Amino acid sequence: MTVTSQTLALQDVRCAGCVLKIERRLAQLPGVQIARGNASQRRLRLVWDDGLQTLDQLTQSIRDLGYDATQIRAEQRVANEPSLLPRLAVAASGMMNIMAFSLSVWFGAVTDMGPGSMQFMHWLSAGIALPVMLYSGSVFHRPAIRAMRAGHMTMDTPITLAIWITFAGSLFETLRGSAHVYFDAVVALIFFLLIGRVLEQAMRRRSDNAAENLRELLNVTANRIGDDCKVTTMPASALVPGDCVLVQTGERVPADGRLLSAQAEFDESVLTGEIKPRRLLRDETVAAGAVLTLGPAEVIVSHVGDASQIGQLAQLVEDVSGHKGRLQLLSDQFARGYIPLVLVGGAFGFVMWFWAFGASFAEALKIAVSVLIVTCPCAAGLATPAVASRAINLALRDGVIIKTGKALELLGDVDQIYLDKTGTAALPELSPDTELDPKTRVAARRLAVASKHPLAQSLVGGANIAPVRGAVEHAGLGIEGPDGARLGRAEFVGLTGIAPDQTTLFYCDADGGVSQIRFQETARPELDAFLCDAHKLRLKVVLHSGDVPASVARFARRVGIKTWFAAQTPHEKLNRITEQERQGARILMVGDGVNDSAALSGATVSASFAGATDIAQSTADIVLTQPHLGLLPKAIVLARSTRRLVVQNLAFSSIYNIVTVPLALAGMLTPAIAALLMSSSSLIVLANAARLRTLR
């Protein structure tokens, strides 16, 4: 079995109901493992067995439903939707001309216009309305007709029915010689609906698409160095692993690779959020998208396009957009059966007025059309995905990758944060005791240079020190110099029965004098600000560590964390979190090591760093692109704001339908006003989602 994944750009998708139909159809096909769509971004994430389905078959299944789908590649940017302004202009022109004829009829009805003149005006109006329907109205007709051919309905189905029923009814009344026709309503309906679509399209274009923005970083040219040392300029997508590329100062690295030059400096802020350039040495890895700030540099390519870090990050962001939280699932359930209710509501309005209240055919038809238009559930369908997509993009801009929509919702509910100590609350590197005798420090560091042990390297601290020649390292014990000096464990230097209460190295000089070198963990520079922000958000912070009690207590006291647990095994960490959650706590676990993976998976929601162990990153619901705890309070504020806006949107959608449906059934809304209200409701939902930037 060959598993293939792909992200598609969807066309003619209006809201969650459209996406839900696509998901359900694809999920029924053999070999399809994942089919997750996002109505706000109009993206679909597909994972399938290549032996049972092909991409062409899957996209054809989508077309059979009345939609269209195109493949997205890392090296290409998705084209914007065609502008609707020409169709809007035709509708506006048609509406103005028909209104002129309608005014003549209205005034003529109370003066002396004869029936022949009035009929002539009606036929002129019909002649103008028809091209407006066929051209401007095709935005709604095409997807609806494609869907109906496949036996399905879309959000455009009620709109299309309303337009054609109104036109056909007006044509029937014209043939009967009636004085009341609604060609002006047909054109006004299309005009107002298109205004809503044009404004919605503009808002979508202005909104951020994080994945697409990341892929744009790969849409650059590369200077490939050939075997004959000649430089050839080509698209980055044409590179293959093993190619050698030349990057000039100020240029963006076209692909992941390994630095061949002696050294260079790169701005990797697109990946890490860190503004300060990073100096790399020969054979260190370089990420695509990084900007060379000090060069030139030669890089040998290792990964291109989707396989690069940027490509994988873009794919992860799209996967995030496809995940659905509780509120999104609720919105999907609402949209699933709504269109049949809309059609039933329109039919009920016609029957009630025509048969029960004795209204004319034209009047009853107008009310039915108003019901069809005003009840279109676009606002409800966009209520959740519009806000969630915006939140995910803003979080990524801050350096926070939220893997699922569920994690975004749960993050806003947390009331406790459990922090691992080493590598999370504290820097992974230990710092030696500064009270050590300077002469002893120098001698110990010279001996430590020859060792690869992490504590020895921490003692050296990156200083340029000449090593002791002839030093021999004893695995698991320490290192010994030719003069007999030793650096390592207590028993290695001749001490017995010593149990240090913190991480310690012992140094024995050539004369037998023993010194104790204590190491302490250094709190992350942003920890104080993180704890302050957590307090403002009323979040309880707990230190959760497997280290010895004395070390944990000392660190907790130094940084000001009141609650801490020490000597915790992975199983004990998980049990403690599970017990707290049984009592109603909602916990965010933050860790970076293998021993944290169980607690990360068991917490309400979990977070790790991009530089953490692979298992921690894969288990965590949230990944920080840089090891900076200050990103978490921002993400929590964003999640809380997201939840608040989603609730506002759902409440607005409910109130909108509660108010407008009775008005339409009571005959208080014309089709044009109904179209204006329906378009406005979708715009209000999108505009409310855009407020997220200012609320976070």
Image (tube, rainbow, N blue to C red):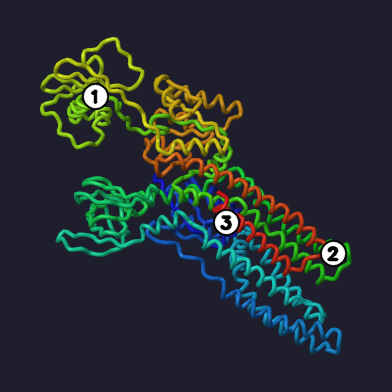
* Residue 250 screen position, x and y as percent: 30, 59
Q: How many numbered callouts?
A: 3
> Which residue is the extreme one toward the top?
497
- Kindly indicate whether the residue at mark 1 contacts the one at mark 2 (C-beta within 8 angstroms): no
Q: Please give the residue where the numbered disc 2 appears in the rendered image.
A: 353
Residue at image location 67% in from the left, 60% down from the top: 681
Q: Distance between the residues labelled 2 and 3?
A: 41 Å
Are discs 1 and 3 less than 8 Å apart at CB?
no
Q: Distance between the residues labelled 1 and 3?
A: 60 Å
In the image shown, does 248 or 97 lie closer to the viewer?
248
551 or 356: which is nearer to us? Answer: 551
Which of pointers 2 and 3 lies earlier in the amino acid sequence?
2
Q: Where is residue 454 in the image (x, y as percent from the top left)?
A: 27, 29
Camera-nearest residue between 464 and 341: 464
Above/below status of 346 relative to 95: above
**Tag 1: amino acid:** Asp
Tell me where residue 142 sits by quadrant: bottom right
At a point 32% along the width and 25% down the height, the residue shown is 519
Residue hosting label 1: 437
Badge 1 element:
loop
Q: What separation in Å lies between label 2 and label 1 (alpha carbons)?
A: 98 Å
Asked which secondary structure carries label 2, the reply is: helix
Viewer-nearest of discs 2 and 1: 1
Task: Specify the label residue 690 is tagged with.
Answer: 3
Q: Earlier in the sequence, mark 2 or mark 1?
A: 2
- At horizontal 22% and vertical 45% (from top left) the residue drawn is 283
Q: Where is residue 117 in the image (x, y as percent from the top left)?
A: 79, 89
> Which sits earlier in the primary sequence, circle 1 or circle 3?
1
